Amino acid sequence: MPAPAKSAFTPFADDAAVQTLGDLTLENGTTRIALHGSLDFARDRESLERARALATTLTAIVTALEDEADLPERAEEARGATTEVKNPFG
């Protein structure tokens, strides 16, 4: 059985990379990686390839986390800057 292809998704490398598998989207970030959507697997070759791609990406994420020297118990919640805007309807 051939090994799964190497993922081009490098976990925590940037705030722009996105990987899509079926209806599942993985959004890269330097502090967090977000998964959105769903992914179905049937008993077919296409599902096998999607499963391999997902396993490769998840393994890369686990490896990146394991390689962190000083990993905190829990990361702080990311809070972006907010700006108040005038209500256009009021």
Image (cartoon, helix red, strand yellow):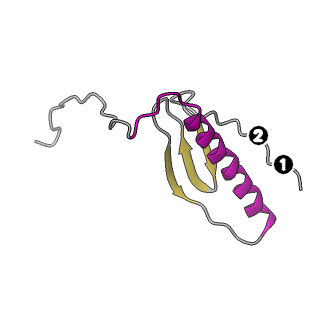
**Region in magenta:** 44-73
Q: Which residue is mark 1?
A: 3
Compare residues 28 and 3 and report the one nearer the observer. Answer: 3
> Extreme right residue here?
1
Q: Residue 4 location in percent, x, y? A: 79, 48
The amino acid pointed to by label 2 is: Lys
> Which residue is disc 2 drawn over?
6
Q: Furthest-left residue in view?
A: 90
Q: Residues within 10 Å of mark 1 (few under 14, many from 20)?
A: few
From the viewer's perspective, is 36 left or right of 23? left
34 drawn magenta? no
Front residue of 2/19: it is: 2
Is-magenta flag for residue 53? yes
SS class of the residue under badge 2? loop
Quarter of the image containing the N terminus? bottom right
Q: Which residue does the image show at 84% across and 48% down from the upper left?
A: 3
Residue 86 drawn at (x, y percent): 15, 33
- In this rendering, the answer to whether 20 lies above or below 10 is below
Q: Amino acid at mark 1?
A: Ala
Mark 1, secondary structure of its residue: loop
**Taken as a whole, is the magenta stretch helix, strand or loop?**
helix
Q: How many marks?
A: 2
Residue 37 location, x and y as percent? 51, 56
Q: Residue 27: percent from the left, percent from the top? A: 53, 40
Do the residues bearing badges 2 and 1 touch, measured as CB atoms within 8 Å?
Answer: no
Task: Write the residue at 58% across / 34% down.
Answer: 17
